[in-house]
Image (spheres, rainbow, N blue to C red):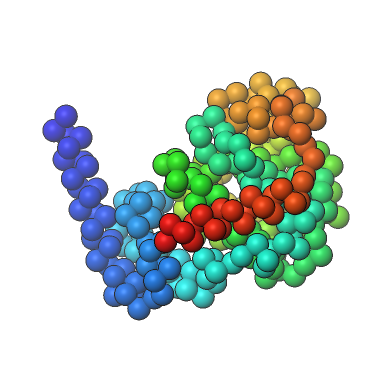
Amino acid sequence: MFDCMESDSQKSGEVEQLRSAIQPQLSTLCPAVQRWCSTNTLRRYLVARDWNVVKAAAMLRSTLTWRQQFQPHNITWTDVAHNASTGRVELLDSTDSLGRPVVLMRLRNKMAPSDVAHQLQFLVYTLERASELADQSGVEKMSWLLEMEGYSPKNSPPFAVTKQSINVLQNHYPERLGHAVLAKPPCIFNLAWNAFYPFLDHGTRDKIVFVRSGADVAKSLKGILDLSSIDRTMGGYRNGEFDLAQYRERMINLQTQQKSEI
């Protein structure tokens, strides 16, 4: 018991060391970024760097600069409505088996015509909403479910978008990913997988779960995703149709709720 108390005390000390290390930069940034930099945020960056304060500080400083420039807190539904319109990416109203919010990607759906900047903006908007839900429920992490039936290079993002998306997720949202489930990827996906696999860090790779074609998706994901998160076409209970009007209303309500809590 003493060892556990000593360990907790040491980690609290490292959190305070990290807070002191980034304070000179943080004090110059906007209030929204300062509010974002909570104790839990500091702990996530420390965990991502194996509690090495120097490495965690370098990582967090990079994110602080990025958040000040990209301003995720100012992205609204109006900014991303076009990219959200196809239902390719949806933050579900259900959770995984551990109560974590679930982001669903329907790879069969076409991407809305858009440039790289707006595609990344939509990704960040989704990550922000999912992170807020994760923090509200105390789980801190989110899960991603990629339904890959119907995947084709024609409806996949350019490599530059995928590479930048990986960079954003790994470097600016560390310890946010619980699992990423790739359900029924076709053989042609192997080409894309081999291209971006080297850009995934070991922590991210360990959280990726493949469910191959022919497998019972619901059975394979037992203990990871609840059946309410899985479309009926894959053995779950969820109606796979995307209702843009309902999604728009839910996202705007989340935004409004978040602003009222600030």
The N terminus: image quadrant: top left
Would residue 29 be found to the left or right of residue 238 on screen?
A: left
For the view shown, which residue lies furthest in the bottom direction? 28
Image coordinates of residue 181 in percent, x first then y, are 64, 38
Which residue shows up at 71% across the image and 35% down it?
183
Residue 206 seen in this snapshot = no
Image coordinates of residue 47 in percent, x first then y, are 37, 49
Would residue 2 be found to the left or right of residue 97 on screen?
A: left
Q: How many marks?
A: 0
- Dividing the picture into quadrants, the one containing residue 72 is bottom right
Q: Who is closer to the viewer here, 201 or 121? A: 121
Which residue shows up at 34% across the image and 64% down it?
57
Image coordinates of residue 232 in percent, x first then y, are 77, 29
Would residue 77 be found to the left or right of residue 234 on screen?
A: left
Q: Who is closer to the viewer here, 255 or 185? A: 255
Question: In the displayed structure, would residue 226 be above or below residue 197?
Answer: above
Image coordinates of residue 38 in percent, x first then y, are 35, 57
The C terminus: image quadrant: bottom left
Residue 133 seen in this snapshot = yes
Which residue shows up at 39% across the image and 75% down it?
29
Which residue shows up at 51% across the image and 54% down it?
257
Q: Who is closer to the viewer here, 14 or 187? A: 14
